[in-house]
Image (tube, grey):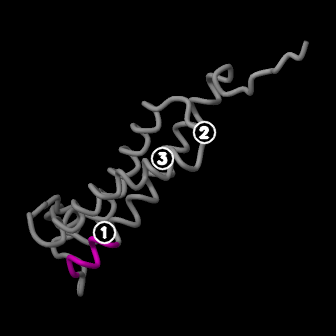
Amino acid sequence: MDLSQFMPALQVPIDGIFIGDFWGFLLALPVALFLAFWMSAVKNRTAVVVGAFAGALLGFIIILGWVGTLIYDTPLPDANPVGVFFGSLFFCSTLGLSGAIILDLIIARNNRRDYRRQVVVHE
């Protein structure tokens, strides 16, 4: 019994699908960071950048596994590089934004002193 038919293909050819996914990932990083800094009061910038990169990278791997040949031997039927690019741009920016906000909230829960409002004392 050959177990290779049940295991992932783990092939990453440099074709149109990979290039579209890669450029969608690269353009999603600044979009996710812009939206994360715009939508929330960020105190720990390093955590937001790491969370955005981790979320966008997760989106890149998910799309490459779903559409490309990371898991299956053949790419998804009727998948074109332009569709993969725009799907990757949207999906990676969404996951990057989610990762940035979630990691910022996890850090905020542990460091409440930095995220509290300052008390104004009137004389």
Q: Please name whichever residue, 25 or 40, is drawn nearer the observer in this view of the structure.
A: 40
Helix, strand or loop at label 1? It is helix
Binning the other alpha carbons within 10 Å of mark 2 as few (below 14), some (14 to 19) or many (20 upward) gives few
Q: Please name whichever residue, 73 or 47, is drawn nearer the observer in this view of the structure.
A: 47
Direction top: furthest residue: 123
Identify which amino acid the numbered label 1 is placed on: Trp
117 left or right of 53 in image = right
User: For the point 27% across and 73% down, which residue is it?
Assistant: 84
User: For the point 51% across and 29% down, which residue is it?
Assistant: 44
Assign the N terminus to one quadrant of the image.
bottom left
**Marker count (numbered):** 3
Circle 2 is placed at which residue position? 41
Magenta portion: prevailing SS class: helix
Task: Give x and y (percent) for residue 103.
Answer: 52, 38
Q: Are marks 1 and 3 in contact (CB under 8 Å)?
A: no
Task: Give x and y (percent) for residue 38.
Answer: 54, 48
Circle 3 is placed at which residue position? 99
What's the magenta region?
80-86
Task: Give x and y (percent) for residue 83.
Answer: 28, 78
Q: Are marks 1 and 2 in contact (CB under 8 Å)?
A: no
